[in-house]
Amino acid sequence: MAETIHLEVVTPKGPVVSEDVELVTAPGYGGEFGVLAHHAPMISTIRIGVMSYRKDNSEARLMISGGFCEVSNNQITFLVESAERGEDIDVDRALRAKERAEKRLAAAARKQEKINQARAEAALQRALARLRVANKGGES
Amino acid sequence: MPSLKDVKTKIEGVKKTSQITRAMNMVASAKLRGAQQRIEDFRPYAEKFQFAMGNLSSGVDPAQYPLMAVRDTGKVELVVITSDRGLCGSFNANIFKLADKEIERLEAEGKKVSLVCVGKKAAGYYRKTGRVRREYTDIMSSFQMFNAREIAQDVAENFLEGNADEVNIIYSRFVSVAVQRPELTTLLPISPEKKDDGGEGGDAAVAQDYIYEPGTEEIMEVLLPLYMNVTVYRCMLEVGASEHAARMTAMDNATNACGDLIHNLTLIYNKARQAGITAELMDIVGGAEALKG
């Protein structure tokens, strides 16, 4: 087995993951990044999206929303607002949320409302990330 | 000797009271379960956050960030968090005791103290002192992150405007169902070295060369306010859980006290009844003797 790094995903609703894994990929500020064992200390903000980790040739995916992650002493800690596994995601709800957000986005763009636009944008991102995690989870 | 009827009324009254206290005890224990779950879920997040903040801020220059600015502390703000409701024993009184001591100490040192009261009890207690800068009431029953954010933002603005040089939170830490400990924790300025005992501060923050993604400043700009939100929110959750635990204990004590009272009153009632019967018997016997004579 390859060398591992300890992964922790913690949300305000409690710890979600605490495992030794081989590879972690996550949506960082400047784009997707990967972390292997013995990564240099790093702190990065995290965007809404899909993170995945690999262990013993199996991959798990989580939908995560904004926060940040810290890497030090061969440990990577994600502090995010929420983290959901594929099986916990309500696909219908995410689909509805997606449609609603798209509508709002269109309406906000017409009226030039910055705040609503940002909020709808975030909602859309979350819905899309949820759908991506849920769909991949169903296939594998 | 009180009359039979008086004692009986009293017993009925105490019974009614004990019904109420028992009901309150059960409500409190049901609410405690939720509140305890919330704080226990949130604590790891807050602790990890604190740890990461410690690591992170050890590598930056405090002078660069207004929220970390250490100034001569002439003006101190205390955020006192209590419950909205009473009937929870000495819970709020214990928080006030700590807060009063702190106010006294600070003012003896010639510092100006301003207060932010969270929870109706604190607002009522300090309203007349003229120290209160803001009040937040009726928010303790529904724990919402945005309440915490509002408070944190307000406090931060006040701090940045120079109206306060230091901000401390006084709250009650939920240690266990039986123990709630009033505590003081420093919110501002955010200092990297200071380990408040809210987290497992045992691990020393090692100064490491972090890769910051994006830059240090952008990260700190996001994280410092977030850190305040998390700290305020944690304190509110702690107080929420403590409040229900304290009420549960207080109401349990009250119910027991009612039981004792009913027991004693029943004794008095029986004695009075017996005394009445004896007096009546004496009358009858006395009357019969008189007729015989």
Image (cartoon, coloured by chain):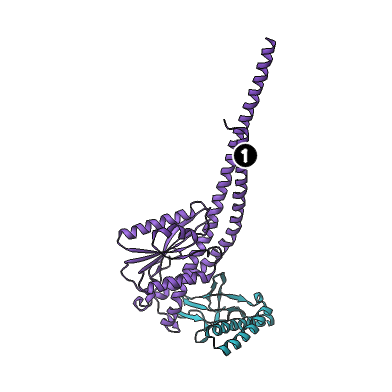
Identify the residue at image location x=45%, y=84%: B214
Q: Is residue B243 left or right of residue B210?
A: right
Identify the residue at image location x=55%, y=85%: A117
Quadrant the C terminus of chain B occupies: top right
Quadrant the N terminus of chain B occupies: top right
Identify the residue at image location x=47%, y=55%: B92
Q: Is residue B81 visible?
A: yes
Using the image, determine if residue A76 lies above or below residue B255. Answer: below
Task: State which chain disc 1 sits on.
Answer: B
- Give the x, y percent position of residue B96: 43, 56
Assign a secondary structure to mark 1.
helix
Out of B223 and B123, give the one closest to the viewer. Answer: B123
Q: Quick one: which residue is furthest to the bottom in this view? A: A110
Q: Quick one: which residue is furthest to the top in this view? A: B293
- Give the x, y percent position of residue B231: 46, 68
Residue where numbered disc 1 is placed:
B9
Letter of the chain shown cyan in the rendering: A
Using the image, determine if residue B5 lies above or below residue A81. Answer: above
**The residue under label 1 is which amino acid type?**
Thr
Q: Colour of chain B?
A: purple
Out of B288 and B221, give the one closest to the viewer. Answer: B288
